[in-house]
Image (cartoon, helix red, strand yellow):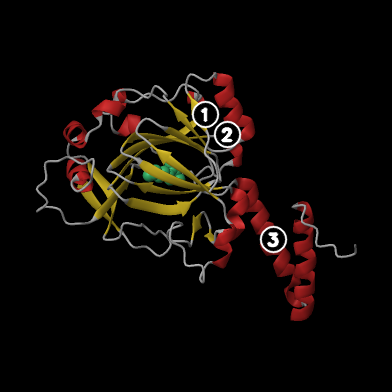
Amino acid sequence: MSQTSVLRSNDSRELVEDWILNLRKPCIIRDCAVGECLTKWKPDYMASTVGHKPVSVHESSSNRLRFLKKNFTYVVLPFAEFIQKASCFSRAGCGDCAGDDCDRRYYYYRAVADDVRNTPSDFRRDFPSLSPDFTVPSFLQPEKIFSCVLRCSSADLGLWLHYDVLDNVLVQVRGRKRAILFNPEDAEYLYLSGDKSLIHDPENVDLEEFPLFVKARPYVYQLEPGDVLFIPAFWLHYMISEDFSVAVNIFWYNLPRELYDQKDTYGNKELQPYFRAAQGVDRALKQLEGLPIDIQRFYMRMLRSKIDKALGLSRDRSA
Ligand SMILES: O=C(O)CCC(=O)C(=O)O
Ligand SMILES: [Fe+2]
């Protein structure tokens, strides 16, 4: 298990910026001023402040959510009812529930804008009654922010292993969370299908099905309320809410804006240069189609060695 790194908000701004801009490794930043949300955002307060605004949430009988082989459904609930359901059998929950109303289901909410097809999420706009309680960490540049996403989860719920293409800080507001991260250099051991992994739960992996996983090096971060986790773009992450959990994550552009997919409102569509490169690969393979299969495969290996060379992984056996 790799070591974790902790910075303090009273460390110099230069140190935090150096970490994010140059070192580009995950870290926890403690003691950031993030506002009164840390004391105010208890389930009852959130439910009564937001009220019955309808929200679309993930509901599952499993406590390890899977996206690729879906084991959840989307249900629309009034926000107050969702908070009651998500918190009522948690260790840090509302305490109002005698247990009889619990339907023993797990809930996860990732806020999206009303116009989700065109607009990234910003809870400061969509939940105006909660907005004054939250302060964006001071080391972030407001003009680079892409989205500011409210996330709430039942206790003991794992969210699928995936990556996003933007830099991210996750502000853990309520409850404890375990974050398991992997360096993108380990992607070849993580059985990706697009931005998500086929591995259901990186803490319980079937090594017969996923033998390369043994080579992947997890970085484990134990988050407490108030902790801010920097997740660099493309680092894979699996998140387990240990208690009823509320977080806000802030995605921002760390590269020039024109490199991103302009229609992406989630922060997980591949960068434009990759999109064009992948089309080029498809075209290249099509060019070979007129040849006998053994010669096609010969040339495919030649093409692969070009990429290996660019990666610094020479297959040159002449030595
Ligand atoms: O902590 C969570 O609920 C999920 C966080 C996440 O995937 C993100 O911030 O990108
Ligand atoms: Fe994410």
241 vs 16: above or below: below
* Residue at figure coordinates x 61%, y 40% from the top left: 259
Give how far apart the Cα atoms at labels 1 and 2 are: 8 Å
Q: Please report whichever mark, 3 or 1, sits nearer to the chain's N-terminal start.
A: 1
| Label 1 element class | helix
Q: Amino acid at mark 2?
A: Asn
Query: Is the residue indicated by label 3 positioned so its CB lies within 8 Å of ligand 2?
Result: no
Give how far apart the Cα atoms at labels 3 and 2 are: 27 Å
In terms of image quadrants, where is residue 285?
bottom right
Which residue lies most toward the right here? 319
Residue 80 spot, x, y in % from top left: 18, 41
Q: Please report whichever mark, 1 or 2, sits nearer to the chain's N-terminal start.
A: 1
| Label 2 element class | loop
Dot 2, crowdedness within 10 Å: few (<14), some or many (≥20)?
some
In front of the other: 174 or 311: 174
Residue at mark 3:
281
Which label sits on residue 144? 1
* Residue at figure coordinates x 26%, y 61% from the top left: 61
In front of the other: 292 or 20: 20
Residue at mark 2:
254
Dot 1, crowdedness within 10 Å: few (<14), some or many (≥20)?
some
Q: Amino acid at mark 1?
A: Lys
226 vs 94: above or below: above
Is there any visible trace of residue 119 in the rendered image?
no
In front of the other: 134 or 225: 225
Give how far apart the Cα atoms at labels 3 and 1 are: 32 Å
